[in-house]
């Protein structure tokens, strides 16, 4: 039996582990988690990508 896990779920679990280990701050963890949606090419990938691009452009 083949079991698949969404890339977004993998990014979420990785983010939770990094937060628990205190390797990431809350803002950085949010960016990593949102990147999972983009990497997984989910329906919300386009708006999330636009949001992250706008945030980067605002601080650049």
Image: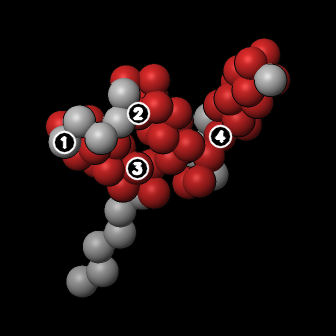
The residue beneath circle 3 is 11
Viewer-side residue, 27 vs 42: 27
Name the residue that disc number 2 marks: 29
Residue name at image x 46 percent, y 31 percent: 28
Sequence-first disc among 2 and 1: 1
Sequence-wise, the earlier of marks 1 and 3 is 3
Under tag 1, what secondary structure?
Answer: loop
The residue pinned by badge 1 equals 21
Q: Quadrant of the C terminus?
A: top right
Q: Residue at x 19, y 42 (%)?
A: 21
Mark 3–mark 4 Cα distance, whole angstroms, equals: 14 Å
Q: Nearer the viewer, mark 2 or mark 4?
A: 2
Image disc number at residue 43 = none
In primary-sequence order, the first of circles 2 and 4 is: 2
- Alpha carbons under labels 2 and 4: distance apart: 17 Å
Query: Whole-percent x and y of residue 2?
Result: 30, 80
**Quadrant in which the N terminus appears:** bottom left
| Residue at 51% across, 47% down | 36
Q: Which residue is mark 4?
A: 45
Numbered disc 3: secondary structure: helix
Label 1 Cα neighbours within 10 Å, binned few <14 / some 14-19 / many ≥20: few
Q: Where residue 35 appears, x then y in whole percent?
A: 56, 43
Q: Mark 2 and mark 3: span between their CA atoms?
A: 10 Å
- Which of discs 2 and 1 lies nearer the camera? The answer is 1
**Residue 33 sits in which quadrant?**
top left
- Left-right relation of 59 to 1: right
Identify the mark nearer the N-term, 2 or 3.
3
């Amino acid at each position: 039996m083949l079991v698949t896990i969404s890339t977004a779920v993998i990014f979420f679990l990785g983010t939770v582990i990094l937060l628990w280990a205190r390797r990431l701050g809350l803002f950085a963890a949010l960016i990593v988690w949102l990147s999972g949606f983009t990497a997984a090419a989910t329906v919300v990938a386009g708006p999330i990508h636009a949001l992250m691009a706008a945030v980067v452009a605002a601080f650049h």
